[in-house]
Image (cartoon, rainbow, N blue to C red):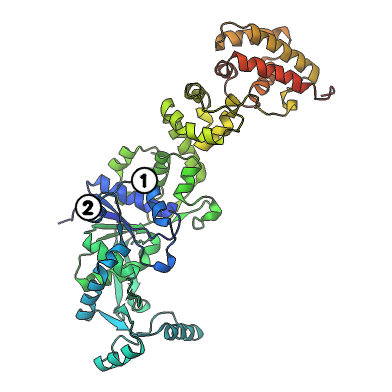
Amino acid sequence: MSRPVRVRYAPSPTGEPHIGNIRSALFNWLFARANGGKFLVRIEDTDQARLVPGAQEKILEGLRWLSLDWNEGPEVGGPHCPYVQSERKALGIYAKHVELLIDSGAAYRCYCTSQRLDQMRADQQARKQPPGYDRRCRDLTAEQRRQRATENPNPAVRFKMPLSGEIAVEDAIRGTVRFDAALLDDFVLLKSDGFPTYHLANVVDDHLMEISHVMRAEEWLSSAPRHKELYKAFGFEMPVMAHLPIILGPDRSKLSKRHGATSILEYRDQGYLPDAMLNFMALLGWSLDDSTELFSRADLIKHFSLDRVTASPAVFNIEKLNWFNGVYIRMMQATELADVLLPIIEEKLPPEAPRPIDRDYLLRIIPLERERLKTLNDAPELLSFFFVEQPKYNPITIIQKGMVRDDTREALTRALRVAEHTEPWDAPTLEAAYRNLAEELELKPGQLFGAMRVALTGRTEAPPLFDTMVVLGKERCVARLKSADYFMKIIPTAC
Ligand code: GLU
């Protein structure tokens, strides 16, 4: 009978929450939600030497940002806390399990000192032998053990791996993966400082937490034969194993800093939306078919299944992420978008822009600019001309093709007059008035509008001119057209 679905995300707090790790979290979360199961978070912090202060908080921050909520936690602390292995070590959980293996003869104390192990490795290297423990302490007599214990009172504990044969691991994504036992040494379960290794703590916890499926990155596949033997030695049922495909950069090398941001929090800080990120990451190794790309959270939960996860590498394409982000930005309600943009604009607009930012004004700007937003962080620059008193630009960019300084000045002076006298201040009235003006001046509409666009927005590309003028308001437009005339005086006549 199949077990109730219980899966976990088991990060080690050794750095920023990397896209690859969070993709594992997402797949586990989706699998739990798709199957009415439970999703757990377990911090694997037993390798004290690799701990990075603050990393655990960042991992949880990343999960919370993506709303990947977990279902339970330790008795002390409760469900809002993750399980933490160092806390579980303090309860004696791992030491107790190691004793079981020593008693059954599946594990043994290893008295070799670090100097001896270093020497052994150096000799192996010199003889071009594969590295690995030479099993010196595997079959000691009681007498030899007593004697060695006097030389090294803090022995490690090692697991007795089979000396030969094949270890076949069933993987739900890759099928049967075979390993040559002769190449796998007797690995450490408990270090001499009393800390369990990853292998021990991981297997013991997966068992005690009744994990039904282990979904983790492909880089852990090499641990699977060791874990299989450990489950066997304990007499525990092994969870279904599924090793998720590696994530590559567009140049097909392993995704790394060279390809840009790798931490999920960097993407948050760069203005990506959590739902866009989620949709994008779900497709790093999973697909429903060859064409569907947009999935809401509910769609993902509905469709996610392990048999649609591929074994072949997934490629991280930032262009794709930008596209997703743009789509999700456009799908947001204007009010929702205004609320997320407000603090970003407030912080990043040039200091001279008046604060607090007027939310109603922002709500009128959003429909004009949202098409151009790829990330939320594009907003301060794109929107700044709406807020600052006078946008900065190079006056020469006002002069349109086929025009010179003086006819441009003349056109803008006339454009100012029109602005002063146009009533009502709405897009159709403005458009009619300025088309008339272009005709009177014998200019192409594009020439007049292009010059006005720069004068009013500081940009050569901006949202539709007359809608923009309506939102900017008559007063600002009049003031900017006046300044344009002033700026143009400083351009040499010859232009
Ligand atoms: N602690 C391992 C990691 O950092 C977890 C591997 C696993 O999920 O078994 O990714």
Residue 274 higher or lower than 87, as above or below: above
Ligand 1 closer than 8 Å to the CB at disc 2? no
Q: Is residue 381 visible?
A: yes
Q: Specify the amino acid type for callout 1.
A: Arg
CA–CA distance in space, label 2 to label 1: 22 Å
Q: Give the image quarter of residue 43.
A: bottom left
Q: Name the residue under label 2.
A: 5
Asked which secondary structure carries label 2, the reply is: loop
Q: Depth-wise, is mark 2 or mark 1 nearer the camera? A: 1
- In the picture as drawn, the residue positioned furthest to the right comes out as 494
**Nearer the N terminus, badge 2 or badge 1?**
2
Q: Can residue 374 be seen in this view?
A: no
On screen, residue 424 versus residue 174, left or right, reads: right
Q: Residue at the spot x=75%, y=20% of the render? A: 486
On screen, residue 413 versus residue 374, left or right, reads: right
Q: Specify the amino acid type for callout 2.
A: Val
- Marker disc for residue 64: 1
The quadrant the C terminus occupies is top right
Q: Give the image quarter of residue 84.
A: bottom left
**Which quarter is ligand 1 in?**
bottom left
Tag 2: Cα neighbours inside 10 Å, few (<14), some, or many (≥20)? some
Rendered location of residue 429, percent (x, y): 58, 8
